[in-house]
Amino acid sequence: MSLTVIGVRHHSPACARLVGSTIAALRPAFVLIEGPADMNERIGEMLLGHELPVAIFTSYLDDRRRHGSWAPFCEYSPEWEALRAGSESGAQLRFIDLPAWHEAFADRDNRYADAELRYAEAVERLCAEFGVDNSDALWDHVIEMCPADGVSDRLSAYFDVIRGESAAGEPDTAREAYMARWIRAARAEAGDRPVVVVVGGFHRPALLRLVAEPSSGGLADAPAGASGWPEIPQPPAEATAGSYLVPYSFRRLDAFGGYQSGMPSPEYYQRLWESGPEEAARHLVTAVAGRLRKRGQPVSTADLIAARTAAEALARLRGHTHPARVDVLDGLAGALVNEALDVPLPWAVRGVVTAGQHPAVVEMTAALSGERVGRLHPDTPLPPLVHSATIELERHGLDRAGEPTVDLTDPRDRAVSRILHRVRVLDIPGFRRDSGPATGIDPVLREQWTVRRHEHRLAALIEAGGYGPTLEAAAAARIAQRIGGAGGDLGALADALFDAALCGFTDLGSDVPGRLERGVATATDLPVLGRVLAVTLALWRHDRLLGTAGSAALGVVVAAASRRILWLAEGWHAPGAPADRARIAAVVAVRDAVVHAAGVGVDRTSAVEVAGRIAADRAAPPDLRGAFFGLGRSLLDETAPPGLFPDPAQAVRGAFAGGTAGDWLSGLFAVAREPVLAPAGILTLLDDLIGGLGADDFLFALPALRQAFTYFPPRERETIGERLLARRGLGGSGRDLLRVTVGAETVAAGMALDEMIEQRLASAGLISAEESG
């Protein structure tokens, strides 16, 4: 019996050719492929006749983690060629790797990410030896651009150097042990017939060693299933996991776009696979010229001749029979880019296209990426969410292009809005809200949407199927995940809660209140926390439009945010800080929560006690001292400790004596204006204290005093004006006092001028000192 283990680089045309020719020559009993073993019963789905690229998408969801993983295939993927050639030769096909939901894949979302990138030292040494920039150029130089004869030996040598004697990490060790069990079982089952194994070249040395060694215990020697083949791991009972084929695209496959696999420029390698290196190079030049001309960039025939000449010269210099990918790219860059570049060329450093690249360079990488989008065969099984969402969208006429307007006061339109928001929350492309309410208390009652067909909609729905079988279940799970991952990011928590309201969710699961409480309890930004509390409380109290009034999740946020604001404010020490309206607004939000939301756990007694301590804390900012004085006085009842809050008149005198009257009053007026407006209130005292300020002290205090009195609405300011006129025995309307036709700065400057003139008149003996005062 012969065992042939082919180590490949994923998405390599040269490796795919080797796999196809080896299987055709050996006609093996089994073809074993690095891929998810839980798909073995469904390999027939892979061979239905899809338009590539496609991918196996696996989703996993439990209380601890949500994981999504892709195993992409294109025509020149060695794994796909193994499926095609193996089926054609009559071999039995098996995937032999752990399922993608397994914890061995917890740190990656792509099964075929290049392992050698984790062994950069060996790659760097080889790049220096061959005089190339990176592993992509190295691979083309030693594999893709060389004759097919001897490619197997070159691959073995390459991966032996990359792997060396280094031990793999724990995840790869578990995978290799599991794959070795499949190889042993296939050898036993095949008898005298050959077995061909196609795996990432990084794993080949370890698998050969494991298969040759006697049993060593551990995962490799776990009991086999009843058929003699290794058992396929099953997800935990409390978890949801599933795998489905999804359409893929060259753009998602491209390393320049961030894909983790090692082969960039999929359109170039597709041409290399179909037509060879000479035609691939010619197509690349033509495609780049076409893209640039379409965008109005001048590309002359002389430029193209110069690019081809440079590419051929570089190929000869680098020892290539035909121009390789980097030869063509370098030739194009030399002919089309005349300016100095601020960033390295993307094919020289390997990775995504960074900002600041020359437009011609961007078009080069785009031309190499290509526009191909896969298409599944109509008989391909799809997850329940696809069918559920399709029915919902068709029922409401949302499956076609349009610009629907939704009236949120109409129950039928509100149902349409919720469907649209659910697909938006799941990141299904083609649905965009152009306008609508920004909060649940926003007076905007209509939404405007744009719906467009999108080539990636099916793939996105399949991938979202891991969250649940229906739009409602999937969107709720997605929002719950966002809440769990927000931590102390109040903006993210608020966005998730508002999305829940827009989707029509008032109950996101029993664990969500705990997540919300933990997230709010770690917040550190007092003003932001105040805004979140104010909006959440309003939604909890009033929102009938979106149905969030009385929501348990919002109630948890109200209680937790109130406690957190009180805790943060008590530790806020900045005695000289000016008044901050956002900081004061947080205290106002706590007041409203105590008054209106006692039923969700906002403790009135605790709020009064904290207010008393902060109001008396001279290290606290004056605006917070005033705000918490107002909070305590407004919440004071017979249960409060005696003497906790001084008389308002005494507190006001203390603020004026400390020189922080305006800031202190800003806090007080924002939270409690009643002490001023009450018949026996402090208005008369304020009039006396302000009138008793010297000219300089008054001008210094004026901006803060003006800010403090802006907390009174116009009608109340008019009342204050009328009382002040009456106190002076003057007639007229208080409203007239509010109609100042010049700015406060002009008034202050005029007062300063009056003061200066009076002082000079007094010094000249023209008026008495009493008159000047």
Image (spheres, rainbow, N blue to C red):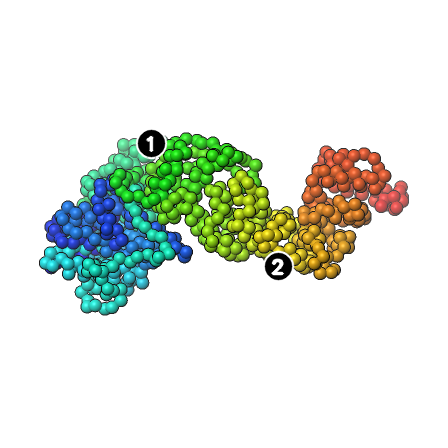
Place of residue 342 in the rendered image (x, y in percent of width and height, measured from the top left): 39, 45
Mark 2–mark 1 CB contact (< 8 Å)? no
Please report the residue visible at 25 percent of the width from the left and 62 percent of the height from the top. 177
In this view of the protein, can residue 465 be seen by the observer? yes
Place of residue 49 in the rendered image (x, y in percent of width and height, measured from the top left): 22, 41
Q: Amino acid at mark 1?
A: Lys
Q: Nearer the viewer, residue 230 or 528?
A: 230
Q: Amino acid at mark 2?
A: Gly
Q: Is residue 146 above or below residue 166?
A: above
> In the shown orientation, is residue 773 left or right of residue 426?
right
Place of residue 19 in the rendered image (x, y in percent of width and height, measured from the top left): 17, 50
Please report the residue visible at 44 percent of the width from the left and 31 percent of the height from the top. 403
**SS class, disc 1:** helix
Judged by depth in the image, the label closer to the viewer, 2 or 1, is: 2
In this view of the protein, can residue 529 be seen by the observer? no
**SS class, disc 2:** loop
Place of residue 552 in the rendered image (x, y in percent of width and height, measured from the top left): 53, 50
Pick out the residue farthest to the left.
192
Tell me which numbered mark, 2 or 1, is placed earlier along the sequence.
1
Q: Nearer the viewer, residue 29 or 765?
A: 29
Quarter of the image for residue 566 reads bottom right
| Residue on which the image places disc 2 | 571
Is the N terminus in the top left, top right, bottom left or bottom right quadrant? bottom left
Of the numbered discs in the image, which one, if any, rests on residue 294? 1
Please report the residue visible at 33 percent of the width from the left and 48 percent of the height from the top. 259
Spatial separation of the CA atoms under disc 2 and disc 1: 62 Å
> In the shown orientation, is residue 124 left or right of residue 7?
right
Q: Nearer the viewer, residue 444 or 249?
A: 444
